[in-house]
Amino acid sequence: MTAIDADTAPEIAGKHLYWSRLRANRAAMASAAVLATIVLLSLLAPVFESLLGVSATRTDLFNQYAPPDAAHWLGTDEAGRDVFTRLLYGGRISLLVGLVAAVGAAVIGTTIGLIAGYHGGWLDSVLMRSTDGVIALPLLPLLIVLAAIDLTKLGVPDGLANSEMASLYRIVFIIAIVGWTTVARLVRAATLSVRTREFVRAAEAMGARSSVIMLRHILPNVVSPIVVATTLSIGSVILLESVLSFLGLGIQPPVPSWGNMLTNAQELATRAPALAIWPGAIIFMTVMAFNFLGDGLQDALDPRATRR
Amino acid sequence: MRLIGVDPGLRFTGWGIVDAEDNRLRHVANGVIRSGSGELAQRLKRLHGLDLPLWERYGNWLGAALGGDFGYSRTYNRPVMDILLPRLGNTVILLGLSSLLAILIAIPLGVIAATRPQSPLDGAINLFCFAGISVPPFWLALVFILVFAVSLGWLPAGGMGAPGESLFARLEFLVLPVVTLTIASMASYTRFARAAMIEVLRQDYIRTARAKGLSGRRTLFGHGLRNAMLPLTTIIALDFGSLFSGALITETMFGYLGMGKLIYDSILGNDFNVALVGLLLATLVVLIGNFLADIAYAVLDPRISFRTLEAA
C-alpha cells in the first residue's frame, strides 16, 4: 500500500505544480488571454454585425475603401464589405482550421508513434522510415501540389468538390496528413521509455491486449509532449493556412479567412495599405500567442525546466 | 527583368501586369486540354503523352529521367534543365546570403541571451525570436514592399535586375528578399543557439574551466560555443527544408526568378515536367541537409562514429 501512496502523491503534487508553473509564466498567461479574446470576438461576429448595422459579406460598391468610422471600425474593403466583422468571421475559419488540422495531425501522429514505439521491430522500422520520408518532402511545395489537385478527377462527387466548404475540408485534410511527423516522433520516443516500466510489464503479465496497454497505460503517460507539440502546431497550421489561402489555394472566397483577405492586398497595396495590414497583424498576434502558450506549457510540463 | 520607370509605385504595378499576362496565356493552353474534346485537344494530349495510362506515363518519365532527359517545359517550350538550372543558381544565391546572414547574427544573439538567462536583454531577444517565428512571411514581404518600395521608394518592389547588369546593380533587388528570408531563420537559429549554449554552460567541464582560472571569454568561446556548435550545426542542416519553403514564398512575393517561384508557377500552370523535377530537387536538398547533418556529427564530435549512428 505504501508503494501506491508514494506513486500517487507526487502525481497530485505534479498537477498542482504544472498549473502553478504555467500561471507564473506571464507570457503564456497573457497569450491565453489574447487567444480567449480573439476566440470570443470571433464567436460574437454576428452580434457585432447586427449591433453596428454592417455586413461582412454584402458588397456595397458605393462604399469602397471607406475610412474607419463609428459603424465600420476598420473601414471597408475593395468590395465595400466591413473589414472589422470580416476579420472576425475570418478568425472563425482560420482558428477552426488551425485547431482541427492540428488535432487531426496529433491523432495520426499519436497513433503511429504509439504503435511504432510499443511494437518495435519491423513495424517500428517501417513506420519510422515512412515518417522520415514525409519529413524529407518539402512542406510548402507539397501542400501546394495537394491543394491544386482537381478533386473531381479523384472521383469526389461534383457537388461536394465544388461546394463552398470544400476548400475548408480540403485544407484541414492536407495539413493533417503531412503535419503528423513531429508528434509521431515525440510519442514514439516517450513510448519507448514508458514501455519498459513496471506497470506496463504488469499489464502484459495479466494478459491485457496490446491496444488496451497502449491506450490505457501508455497514452496517459505520454500526454505532455502531445499537448505541447499540438499547441505549437496550431500556430504553424494557421501560418500555413494563411499562406495557402493568400496564394489562392486555401479557403476560397466568399468564405473569409485571414489568409484570403490578403490575396488582393498585394495589388491594392498602393491604394489601400490598411487592408494589407490588419489581417496580417492579427495572424501575427494569434500565431505568436500560440507559440508563447506552447512554450509556457513546455516549461510547465517538462521537469527539466525546474533546473533553470 | 528590370521594369521600366523610376517611380517605385509604377514599377510595382508594372510587375503585376507582367505576371498576370503570363498567367492568362498559360490558362488558354490548359483550357484547351481540359475541354477534352476536339482535334486540337487530342493532338495536345498526344503531344504531352496524356493519352497513356498513368503507370505507363510514370514509367516513360522515369526511364527518360534516369537517362538525364527530364522532358520539356510546357510553359517555356524548352528542356526542363535549361530552365531549372539558372533558377537554381538564383535560389542558391538567395538562400546562401540569407543563411549566412542568419547564422552570423543568430550565434552572437544566442550566446548573449544564454549568458544572461532571465535578464531583460534575454527577454528582449526572446520576444524578437518569437516575433520572427510567428510573423507570416508573405505578409512581412508585403509590409516591406509597402514601406521600402511604395512609401519610401528606396528599393525596388521586386524583380531581378537586367541580366547584363553588374552584380552591384542587381544587389538592390536582393535586399528585401534576403532580409525577409533571413528574419524567420535567424529567429529560429537564435533560439537553438541559446538553448544549446545554456545546455553546454550547465556542464561540469565549464565549471572545471572556470575553476582552473580560465578567463570568462575563453571559457565561453573555447569550451562553451565550441561544444554548442555541434547541436547547432545539426539543426541548421536539418532546417534546409523549411528554408526552401521560405524561398518559395519570398521569391513569389518579390518576383524573384528562383526555384521556389518556378515550382509554384509550374504547379499552378500545370507545367508537370518542371513541377516534378523542381519538387525532386527540393526533396534532394532536404536529403542532402540530413546527410550533411550526419557527417557534421561525426566530424565535429570525435566520440561519435558512423557505427554508433547506425546503432542508434
Image: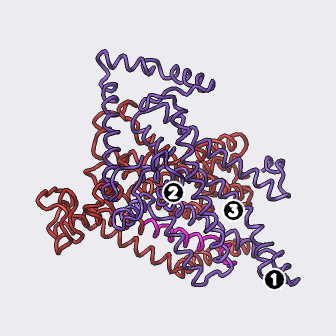
Chain colours: A red, B purple
Q: Which residue is mark 1?
A: B215
The mark that comes first in sequence, 3 or 1, is 1
Residue A239 falls within the magenta-colored stretch: no
Q: Which residue is mark 2?
A: B171
Check the image and name the residue furthest to the left. A62
Question: Would you call the spot at circle 2 few (<14 residues within 10 Å), some (14-19), or many (20 or more)?
Answer: few
Q: Give the number of the mark in front: 2 or 1.
A: 2
> Left of B40 or right of it: where is B294?
right
Relative to the observer, which residue lies in front, B10 or B106? Answer: B10
User: How many badges with numbers are in the image?
Assistant: 3
Choose mark 3 or mark 1, whichever is in front. Answer: 1
In the displayed structure, does residue A126 sit left or right of residue A142?
right
The picture places residue B197, in percent across and down from the top left corner, at 70, 71
Between A229 and B7, the one lying in front of the other is: B7
Give the amino acid at mark 1.
Ser
Per the model, the C-alpha gap separating discs 3 and 1 is 24 Å
Amino acid carrying label 3: it is Leu
Q: Magenta part mainly helix, strand or loop?
A: helix
Q: Can see residue B42?
A: yes
Q: In this image, A302 relative to B48: left or right?
A: right
Amino acid of disc 2: Leu
Q: Which residues are magenta?
A: A286-308
Residue reaching furthest to the top: B39
Chain where mark 2 sits: B
| Residue B232 badge | 3
Please report the residue visible at 45 percent of the width from the left and 78 percent of the height from the top: A30
Residue B182 x, y percent position in the rendering? 54, 61
Residue B39 versus residue B61 in the image, above or below: above
State the separation of the CA atoms marked 2 and 1.
42 Å
